[in-house]
Amino acid sequence: MHIKTDKSVLTVACTTLLTFLLLFLHDKLAGKIGAIWLLYPNILLSAGWFGYLIWKQRETSEILFRSVLFGFATAATYLPIDWLFSRKMYLIVYRSTDVTTPIGLILTWTIFATLTVYSYHRLHQNGLHRFVASVITGAAAGLGSIVIYGLGPALWTWNELRVENIAKIATVPVFVPFTFLLTYTLCPYYFHREQPALVAGMRCGLFMGALMFLSFLVFYRWR
């Protein structure tokens, strides 16, 4: 069963992936445009399209509206752990800014979280048990994090601490997809039932931040 917002969400997912493919090719295609600015056309497209659908098609866009709220809350709540990794631990270093985390990247996280939880709701609406939908969502989030972080070296550099023998998948530390896998397997199932979207998003962001730090410590000690 399809609803009117499905095609738009799929389009935003495709344009987001295309954006990161362009970022991956940025050094080869680079002119005078900083890599971070390549994120903004997709951000504006996503915000404009989602805002239009939520305003114009209120009957069919309730899931999208709740997913956007969830995405904003998750991205905002996760920020402290990113500050810890980037400003205090220097595990990840952003190349295009002197601030802790680029605004364009925070908004892009919001898009990712929105797409992920929207997918969970649509899977459940189409007849899958909540936990099965969460497992599929978590697996997609884990694999997606490998792809996205692997395509983003123009924006960031992982492991500036030069921790020897830290486990990686391609260029991505293994604790990153592990965190996304567990977060989006457990959080939609446990935290996004009858709760307000903002509350669920904040819980998800807190869970992801704590899990990211703890999984880093585990993989660091077992390297």
Image: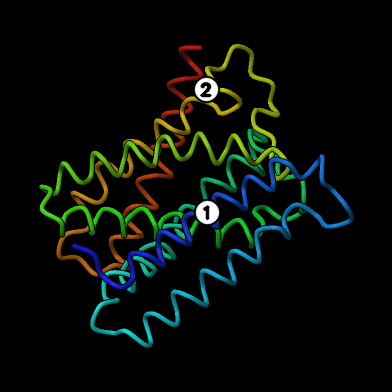
- Coordinates of residue 31 in the picture (x, y in percent): 88, 52
Dot in front, 1 or 2: 2
Type of amino acid at the residue the image marks with label 1: Leu
Left or right of 42? Residue 221 is left
Residue 74 to residue 50: above or below: above
Q: Amino acid at mark 2?
A: Ile
Query: Mark number for residue 217?
Result: none
Mark 1 residue element:
helix
Neighbourhood count class around disc 1 (C-alpha, 10 Å): few under 14, some 14–19, many 20 upward: some
Using the rendered view, name the quadrant where residue 54 is placed. Answer: bottom left
Answer with mark 1 or mark 2, whichever residue precedes in sequence: 1
Q: Is residue 31 left or right of residue 68?
A: right
Q: Residue at x 58, y 66 (%)?
A: 43
Q: Which residue is mark 2?
A: 169
Q: Residue 111: x and y, percent?
A: 47, 60
Q: Is residue 95 above or below residue 178?
A: below
Count of numbered labels shown in the rendering: 2
Q: Residues within 10 Å of mark 2 (few under 14, many from 20)?
A: few
Please state, as top left, top right, bottom left or bottom right, where the N terminus lies in the image.
bottom left
Judging by the rendered image, the residue that carries numbered circle 1 is: 79
Q: Is residue 58 left or right of residue 28?
A: left
The structure residue drawn at horizontal position 34% and vertical position 60%, both measured from the top left corner, is: 201
Image position of 121 with respect to 152: above or below: below
Residue drawn at x 44%, y 33% is: 177
Taking depth in this image into account, of 223 and 33 the one nearest to the observer is 33
Q: Secondary structure at mark 2?
A: strand
Which quadrant of the structure image shows residue 181?
Answer: top left
Is the image coloured rainbow, by chain, by secondary structure, or in one colour? rainbow
Q: Residue furthest right?
A: 32
Q: Residue 35 location in percent, x, y? A: 75, 52
